[in-house]
Amino acid sequence: MKPHSVYVTRRIPQAGLDLLAEVAEVDINPEDAPLTRAELLEKAAAYDGVIGMLSDRIDGEFFDAAARLKGYANYAVGFDNIDVAEATRRGIPVSNTPGVLTDATAELAWALLFGVARRIVETDKVMRSGAWTGWGPLQFIGGDVKGKTLGIVGAGRIGTAMALMSRGFNMKVLYTSSSGRHNAVLEDELNAELVTFDRLLEESDFISLHCPLTDGTRHLFDASAFARMKETAYIVNTARGPVIKEADLAAALKSGQIAGAGLDVYENEPAMDPGLAELDNVIVLPHVGSATISSRTDMATLAARNLTAMLRGKQPETCLNPELFKG
Ligand code: GLV
Ligand code: GLV
C-alpha cells in the first residue's frame, strides 16, 4: 500500500495519473461525467487528497465532509468554484493550474475573435448546406481586425498573452485593471493604455474578457454595458460565463446593439441562454480554452505535483492559500 490515497473526479491525461501513482493509491471517476454532489462529498470524506474540476463546488460543506483531506488541487486556473477562505479556516491547502494554459486560452480568444469577425461558423454552414450560389460582392461582409482597437478586461497572464498576440495586426490596445495597477509589459511592448471601464466600452472594436469571476466582475457586462459599446464592436469571452449577463447579451446581439460575440463559457454551464442558439452573429464553443495537448497534459502534471506536495505537508507550487505555510 502506498502511504496516501487520492481521488480524481474526472479522467485526466495519463501523465498526471502516473505521477500520482508514484506516491498514492489513485482512484478515478470511471464515468466521463461530473460526480453528483453526494458522490463528491463521499469522496471528500474517504481520501487524503482530491483533484477536482471547475464543475465541482469545493465549499464549506465539502471541507466539513473531508475528515482526512490534506489538500485539494483544482484542475483549472480559475478557482471561483473553490471557497478558499473556508479551506484556509480549516487549514486545508488548495491549488490551481496557472501558467500552463495561458497561450492555449489566448489563442482560442483569437480564434473566436477572427471567427466572429469573419463569420467563419455562419458561412461554413451556408457552404455545407449547399445554399451558396457563387461569389458575390456584398456577401458575408465582416469586420476588419488590423488597426482596430482591442480592449482587454483583466490584463493578467492570459489577457497579457492575448494582447501581445495582436502585434501582427497593429492594434491599439486598451486595458482595465481592477487593482488600478499598470501592466508594464503591455505598456512597454504595445503602448497599451490603462483606461476606465467606460472608455474601454466606448472605444474598443473588440473586447476580450480575461478577468476572474468575483463579486466585482459578476454581470460586469449587462444591458447598460452593451448599450455603451459601439454597434460595430465584438465581445469575446474565454474567462467565466457569469461575467456576462447572458440574456442581456442575447438581446444586444439580436437587436444589433453590438455586432457579434464569441463565447467559450456560459452563465449556467453546460446550459446556454436559448436566445443565443438562434443567432448567426455569435459563436458558441463548449469551454475548450485549455483544450490543447500540451495544456491539458501540463495541467495534469502540475495538479499532480501540487497534490503530492500537499500530501507531504509542503507548500504546492501554485498555492491559493500560501499563508498556511508561513511561520
Ligand atoms: C478553465 O476554464 C480553467 O479555469 O482552467
Ligand atoms: C488568470 O487566471 C490568468 O492566468 O490570466
Image (tube, rainbow, N blue to C red):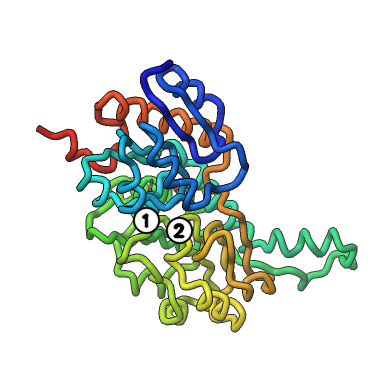
Mark 1 CB in 8 Å range of ligand 2?
yes
Residue 291, image x and y in percent?
Answer: 57, 42
Q: Quadrant of the N terminus?
A: top left
Mark 2 CB in 8 Å range of ligand 1?
yes
Mark 1 touches mark 2? (CB < 8 Å): yes
**Residue 112 located left or right of residue 78:** right
Q: Which residue is mark 1?
A: 212
In terms of secondary structure, where does tag 2 sit? loop
Q: Which residue is mark 2?
A: 240
Q: Quadrant of the C terminus?
A: top left
Q: Counting other residues with Cα less than 10 Å from the Cα at mark 1, is it few (<14), some (14-19), or many (20 or more)?
A: some
**20 in relation to 152, above or below:** above
Circle 2: residue type:
Arg
Q: Quadrant of residue 129?
A: bottom right
Task: Identify which residue, 161 or 35, lies in the foreground.
Answer: 35
In terms of secondary structure, where does tag 1 sit? loop
The residue drawn where x is 53% and y is 47% is 35
Residue 123, image x and y in percent?
Answer: 76, 63
Instruction: Let me know if residue 98 appears in the view.
Output: no
Q: How many marks?
A: 2
Task: Identify which residue, 305 or 157, lies in the foreground.
Answer: 305
Q: Quadrant of residue 292?
A: top right
The residue drawn where x is 63% and y is 62% is 283
